[in-house]
Every structure is written in structure tokens, then in C-alpha cells.
Image (cartoon, helix red, strand yellow):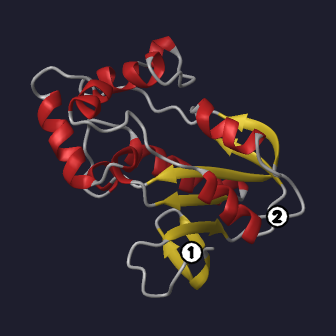
Amino acid sequence: MIKIQAEANVPTEHGSFRMIAFSENENDWMPHMAIVAENTDFSKPVNVRFHSECITGEVFHSKKCECGQQLDAAMKYTHDHGGIIVYLRQEGRNIGIINKLKAYSLQEKGFDTVQANLELGLPADDRNFGVAIEILNLLEVKDINLLTNNPEKVKYVLNSNINLNSRVPLQIPANETSKGYLKTKKDFFGHLLDDNDN
């Protein structure tokens, strides 16, 4: 069972957030995080984003995906409207950065993101959002507006004890590099994306 290991207020360029680390033990260097906007009203439906770690997009601003932009947009939205980002350590759809770079290498040879994972003997998407539900339960969140384009995340909430009040799209326009990535998200994973943006 995970539990809160540490928490502190952290000022960011998007505003001040309460950052809370969750793991089974306090020596875990890769804990999941809840990033809670300071004006969050827990008596109303809470705006929530389940966000999986993406070091290439968030830290190095890769143009292959929109992960970093989605995180920035979610931080701005939750700062403006209140809310929580549940930051999950599931790099590369939970295959890890080494396998992700191997997959990128295959993509350079013409494979799409799903084909590259399968060619490596890995699942197309190995993420589990059950831990996000567990974190919301620990924070005593009962009712949410989910910031997502991913129907799989919606299913996790619908199959949980948390009420889904609404889904809030979080769509980032495609660039020349990310067009194929977003097309795969829509065609293979069924992400709810507008045609004119990918």
C-alpha cells in the first residue's frame, strides 16, 4: 500500500502547488506525486489530470510528443481553476526510458509508436491508472472533472468509487514531428482528438 511520504509547498512559474510524494517506502527515489493547486476546493468536483512521466517531453522539450505541453497546460488549468495533477512514474507508457529510446530508434526506421513497442516484445501501453485512483482516495477526493483525451483513463474512473462529473479535453495542436504520434493515439488507442489538430 502506498502512503504519503513527504509534502511541501513549491512555487512554480504556473503558481504555488502543494507537492505530495506517495510510495510504499520513504527511500523510494521515484515516488508518484500529487501536485495540488493551492486554491483547490475539495467540497466541489475537483479538476484532476492523470499524467504519466515523460522525461523527453517534459525536461528536454521533445517535439515527438505533446506530453510536456500537456503538463504545462494542466498546471496552468489547475492553478486557474483549482485541481490536482496525479504525476505517475510510468515513463514511455511504462516501458522505461531505455526501452523508449530503443523504440525511438525503430521509429526512425519507419515504425509507428505502437509497432516499435511490439517489435521490441513490449506491450503497446503498459500503464496502470489504478494507483492514481488510490492516490485520490488517500486525498479523500470523491468527485472529479478529468482532464484527458484518453478513454482508458475515463474507464478507470468509471470502474472506481470516484464519481466522474465531466471530462475536460486537453488537446495540444500537432506539429510536423508529432502528427504521426497523435494519429496513432487516435487510431490505435481511440484518443478523443479532433481531426483538424492532428
Label 2 Cα crowd, 10 Å radius (few <14 / some 14-19 / many 20+)? few
Q: Where is residue 43 in the image (x, y as percent from the top left)?
A: 90, 62
Q: Where is residue 131 in the image (x, y as percent from the top left)?
A: 60, 59
Q: Which residue lies furthest to the right in this view?
A: 43
The amino acid sitting under disc 2 is Asp
Report the side of 11 relative to 38 (left or right): left
Q: Position of residue 73 (x, y in %)?
A: 51, 47
Q: Which quadrant would the N terminus be assigned to in this image?
A: bottom right
Point out the tag, 2 or 1, that comes first from the N-terminus: 1
Residue closest to the eye, 99 or 80 = 99
Q: In this view, does 110 lie above or below 49?
A: above
Badge number at residue 126? none
The amino acid sitting under disc 1 is Phe
Q: Position of residue 25 (x, y in %)?
A: 51, 84
The picture quadrant where one finds residue 109 is top left
Q: Mark 2 points at which residue?
A: 41
Residue in the image at 57% along x and 33% along y? 150
Judged from the image, the secondary structure of the residue bearing numbered disc 2 is loop
Judged from the image, the secondary structure of the residue bearing numbered disc 1 is strand
